[in-house]
């Protein structure tokens, strides 16, 4: 078969695969065709998109650059400018701002030299608007996105119109005009979910909208759009960008809803996916989520390493690292970290995420006045925004501080409301944390029986989740656990008891625990004495009755 026939065949297969969104095949076939005979600008554009979507960013950049050169040489400024736009966007996301600016300036000069009125002029308004949004000038950003949207409407360009709505929505959210902002974000998502936007734009919009929803604590929208992103990724198995972020979002939601094992699986998948190659900076968020799971499950060493790794990739380790220090019995270190983080918080959204942990740390160091000020600030934010998650956080913070102030009756009312909110949000861990505070309030009011019921309910949730530090804390608070014979068993004696209950002989237990049979005999005798039983069957019954298995 001669080269021209082979090129045509590979080119046809590449175009067909591109149409099916089989990105890996499209990249391979178009690359093969290009190696025999240089592709035309339209096919170079397809090659660049396919390369980007399978994570071959260097290949994508080279294909975009060639698209620019060939399109410019053929007096096709629209295609050339679009290529320069994507080069600039990609380089900007990688932090290579000087090169990004150079390509965008080149594109602007090409438009000016051509003297043509083309929609791509609107695309070039997006990067500077994004820069203004990220550097704290949302009003100027909004104006830039609005201008881009007007150009999109004039040309009927869906991709640019979607970017314009996304940017305006983000800008309004940053200006605390949440209702209007969320409305525009929803409009952008409608175009994406309906398949009207191109894959490059769709992936950007999915991730940006979910991030915006999480930043304003709108869990319902975050969950809805995360599910949509998951479905979108599933239809394109070769997709590399966006899939890692999708896994991170899923992991965070799974942890929130109490599916910690599933969250751990998704977090590890996200970490592996995002570490590439190519390496995606979003790996920092995956590492932070891993650190949070390790902290909550009582693995401080693992949590410490993950927080440090997350920080290395640009993800600030607060508030998790402060709460880890608190769990390690280092309240002063936790206090220094959380105060410094709050002082540095230069935007409202960052501050909101720090306030409730700051209340917890302030109470731990005995600074009741600061804890009250922070709880009141959080309550004001919740009142202004009305997001259910913020309301739940504010009610819990207020109840906890009020209890520390000595007004148990008022605190109990706030805590009961907080528990209801967390239940409605389907957040079992957070709801259980509130029940511990409810138990303390009941105890302060002299109702020890109800306090024990609350502690026991919280303990069951913590055990089911694997939240070992919280189980230990509740056990320390509970008088029923403190007086229980089972609480006097050593860790090794508990292991022996569980194996006895499983029907193992002393010899089998010795082999499994790698200890001598005489040592097992001693452990069995000790636990018989502590539990006040005389037979293995009685010890087994006790183990089942007291949920020790």
Image (cartoon, helix red, strand yellow):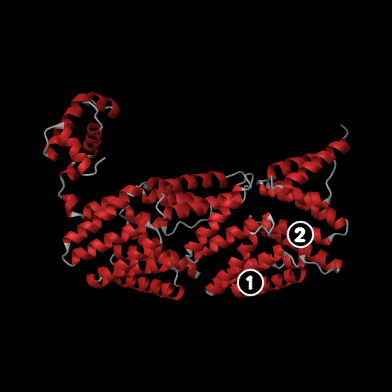
Going 57% across and 74% down the picture, which residue do you hit?
Answer: 180
Along the line of sight, which residue is nearer the eye, 370 or 156? Answer: 156
| Residue 332 drawn at (x, y percent) | 33, 60
Say whether residue 281 is visible.
no
384 is higher (above) or lower (below) than 526: below
| Dot 1 alpha-carbon crowd within 10 angstroms: few under 14, some 14 to 19, many 20 or more | many
- Quadrant in which the C terminus appears: top left
Looking at the rendered structure, the number of numbered marks drawn on it comes to 2
| Residue 16 drawn at (x, y percent) | 76, 45
380 is higher (above) or lower (below) than 366: below
Outermost residue, front side: 194
Sequence-first disc among 1 and 2: 2
SS under mark 1: helix
- Quadrant in which the N terminus appears: top right
Going 48% across and 70% down the picture, which residue do you hit?
Answer: 348
In the rendered structure, the answer to whether residue 299 lies left or right of residue 72 reads: left
The quarter of the displayed image where residue 352 is located: bottom left
Along the line of sight, which residue is nearer the eye, 447 or 472? Answer: 447
Label 2 belongs to which residue?
82
The quarter of the displayed image where residue 544 is located: top left
In the rendered structure, the answer to whether residue 78 lies left or right of residue 215 reads: right
| Residue 528 drawn at (x, y percent) | 14, 35
SS under mark 2: helix
Tag of residue 97: none
Tag of residue 141: 1
Q: Label 1, label 2: how many angstroms apart (C-alpha)?
A: 21 Å
Say whether residue 260 is visible.
yes
240 is higher (above) or lower (below) than 509: below
Along the line of sight, which residue is nearer the eye, 432 or 126? Answer: 432
In the rendered structure, the answer to whether residue 150 lies left or right of residue 398 reads: right
| Residue 22 drawn at (x, y percent) | 69, 45
């Amino acid at each position: 078969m001669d080269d021209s026939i082979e090129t045509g065949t590979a080119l046809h297969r590449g175009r067909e695969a591109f149409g099916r969104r089989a990105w890996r095949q499209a990249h391979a076939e178009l690359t093969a065709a290009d190696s025999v005979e240089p592709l035309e600008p339209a096919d170079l554009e397809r090659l660049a998109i396919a390369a980007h979507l399978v994570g071959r960013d260097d290949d994508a950049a080279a294909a975009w650059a060639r698209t620019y050169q060939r399109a410019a040489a053929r007096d096709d400024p629209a295609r050339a400018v679009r290529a320069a736009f994507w080069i600039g966007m990609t380089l900007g996301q990688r932090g290579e701002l000087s090169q990004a600016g150079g390509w965008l300036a080149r594109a602007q000069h090409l438009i000016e030299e051509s003297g043509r009125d083309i929609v791509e002029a609107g695309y070039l308004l997006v990067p500077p608007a994004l820069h203004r949004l990220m550097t704290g000038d949302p009003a100027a950003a909004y104006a830039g996105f609005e201008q881009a949207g007007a150009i999109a409407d004039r040309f009927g360009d869906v991709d640019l119109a979607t970017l314009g709505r996304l940017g305006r929505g983000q800008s309004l959210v940053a200006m605390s005009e949440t209702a209007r902002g969320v409305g525009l974000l929803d409009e952008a998502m409608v175009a994406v979910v309906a398949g009207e936007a191109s894959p490059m734009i769709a992936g950007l919009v999915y991730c940006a909208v979910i991030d915006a929803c999480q930043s304003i604590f709108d869990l319902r929208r975050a969950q809805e759009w995360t599910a949509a992103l998951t479905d979108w990724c599933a239809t394109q198995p070769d997709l590399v960008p966006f899939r890692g972020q999708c896994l991170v979002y899923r992991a965070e939601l799974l942890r929130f809803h109490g599916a910690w094992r599933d969250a751990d699986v998704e977090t590890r998948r996200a970490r592996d996916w995002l570490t590439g190659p190519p390496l995606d900076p979003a790996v920092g968020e995956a590492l932070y989520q891993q650190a949070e799971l390790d902290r909550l499950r009582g693995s401080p060493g693992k949590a410490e390493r993950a927080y440090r790794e997350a920080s290395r990739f640009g993800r600030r380790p607060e508030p998790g690292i402060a709460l880890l220090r608190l769990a390690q019995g280092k309240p002063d270190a936790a206090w220094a970290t959380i105060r410094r983080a709050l002082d540095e918080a230069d935007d409202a959204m960052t501050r909101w995420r720090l306030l409730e942990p700051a209340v917890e740390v302030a109470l731990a160091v005995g600074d009741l006045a600061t804890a009250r000020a922070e709880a009141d600030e959080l309550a004001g934010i919740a009142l202004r925004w009305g997001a259910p998650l913020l309301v739940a956080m504010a009610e819990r913070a207020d109840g906890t501080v009020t209890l520390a102030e000595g007004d148990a009756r008022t605190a109990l009312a706030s805590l009961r409301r907080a528990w209801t909110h967390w239940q409605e949000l389907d957040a079992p861990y957070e709801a259980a944390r509130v029940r511990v505070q409810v138990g303390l309030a009941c105890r302060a009011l002299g109702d020890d029986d109800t306090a024990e019921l609350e502690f026991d309910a919280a303990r069951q949730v913590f055990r089911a989740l694997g939240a070992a530090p919280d189980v230990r804390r509740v056990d320390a608070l509970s008088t029923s656990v403190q007086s229980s014979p089972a609480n006097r068993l050593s860790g090794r004696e508990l292991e022996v008891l569980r194996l006895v209950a499983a029907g193992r002989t002393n010899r089998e237990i010795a082999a499994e625990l790698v200890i001598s049979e005489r040592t097992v005999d001693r452990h069995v005798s000790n636990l018989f004495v502590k539990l006040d039983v005389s037979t293995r069957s009685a010890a087994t019954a006790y183990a089942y009755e007291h949920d020790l298995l």
